[in-house]
Image (cartoon, rainbow, N blue to C red):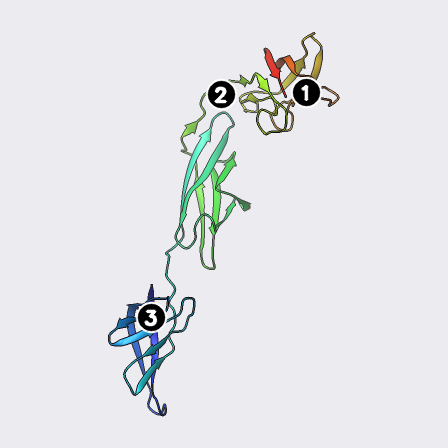
Amino acid sequence: MVRSFAIILCMLSACAVQAQVTFDRVVISPFAINANAGGLEFYSTGGQPEFTTVGEDPFFLTQGFEQPLDKGPLSVEVSTVYNACTALFEYRVEEISGCTDAAAANILWDGVPGDSVYFSSFPQAELIVSGPVGCYLSQLIDASNAPVTETDCALIFYSFISPNGDGMNDTWVIKHINSPLFGPNEVTIVGRWGEAVWSRKNYDNETVVWAGESADGSELPDGTYFYFVTIGDAQYTGYIELQR
C-alpha cells in the first residue's frame, strides 16, 4: 500500500522552531508492523488515517495522511447481436472495470435502470454506468452492424406440457410464434373426442398461453390433446401430451 506523509518536526520542550518535512512515497504496513524508511520508523493501525512516527531525539514526528489508491477510469466492454426471429437487438455488458466493478455498478439503458443484458428494437442504445462519487461513464452503443443470430425462424410446436408449478414445461410453447415474420394467429386445443376445450387469438407464450386448463379455467385431465394453429392462410396441426 502506498502512502504520502507531510510531517511537522517539533522540539520536545517547545515548538518555537518548526520545520516541515515531506517524505517521498514509501511502502508501509497497515497492520501495526514497523517498516523502516530512511532511518525513521512508521507505526500505523489498520483502518486509521493518521500515523505516528518516531525519529531521533530531540525531535518527534506527527500527523500523516493516507493517500487513496487510484483504480483508474471506468471502463465498460459491451457486445451486441441482432435476433432476426424476434427483430430485437441484444446489448450485453461483458465487463466493468476501473473505479467500480459489475457487482457495485448502477446500469441504465436509455434512461431506465436495468442489468447487464438489454433488448431493444432500435440499433442504438444509450448506456450509463456509475459507481462511487466521480465514477461515471455514458456512451451511445451502435449495433447497426451487429452479427445476426437465430437465423432459423421456423415455428417449433412443443409436444409436452406439465403444468404442476415446478417451473418446467408449465405452459405450452410455440417457439418463434411472436416473431414479426408471422402475422396474427389463432390457437385451438381439442380433446380426444374432437371437442374444442380451449381457444385464443394472438398466442404469444406469455400473456396468451395454454397451461392445461379448459375454456372456463378448470384443470383438464392428463392425456393427449391436439392443436390447430392458424396463421394467415397456413394451418398447423399436431398433438400435445398433458401430464401433471
Three-letter amino acid code at disc 3? Ser
Q: Earlier in the sequence, mark 3 or mark 2?
A: 3
Q: Is residue 23 above or below residue 10?
A: above
Q: Does residue 44 appear anywhere in the picture?
A: yes
Label 2 CA crowd tier, 10 Å (few <14, some 14–19, many 20+)? some
The percent position of residue 20, horizontal first and vertical second, equals: 32, 82
Instruction: Name the front one of labels 1 and 3.
Output: 3
Image quarter of the C terminus: top right
Label 3 CA crowd tier, 10 Å (few <14, some 14–19, many 20+)? some
In this rendering, position of residue 82 left or right of residue 34: right
Q: What residue is shown with label 3?
A: 4
Instruction: Name the front one of labels 3 and 2.
Output: 3
Image quarter of the N terminus: bottom left
Q: Residue at x 63, y 29 (%)?
A: 165
- Gap in angstroms between the C-alphas marked 1 and 3: 72 Å
In this rendering, position of residue 116 left or right of residue 65: right
Q: Residue at x 64, y 13 (%)?
A: 223
Q: What residue is shown with label 2?
A: 153
- The label number, if any, that marks residue 200 in the structure image: 1
Q: Is residue 79 above or below residue 169?
A: below
Q: Nearer the viewer, residue 153 or 239?
A: 239
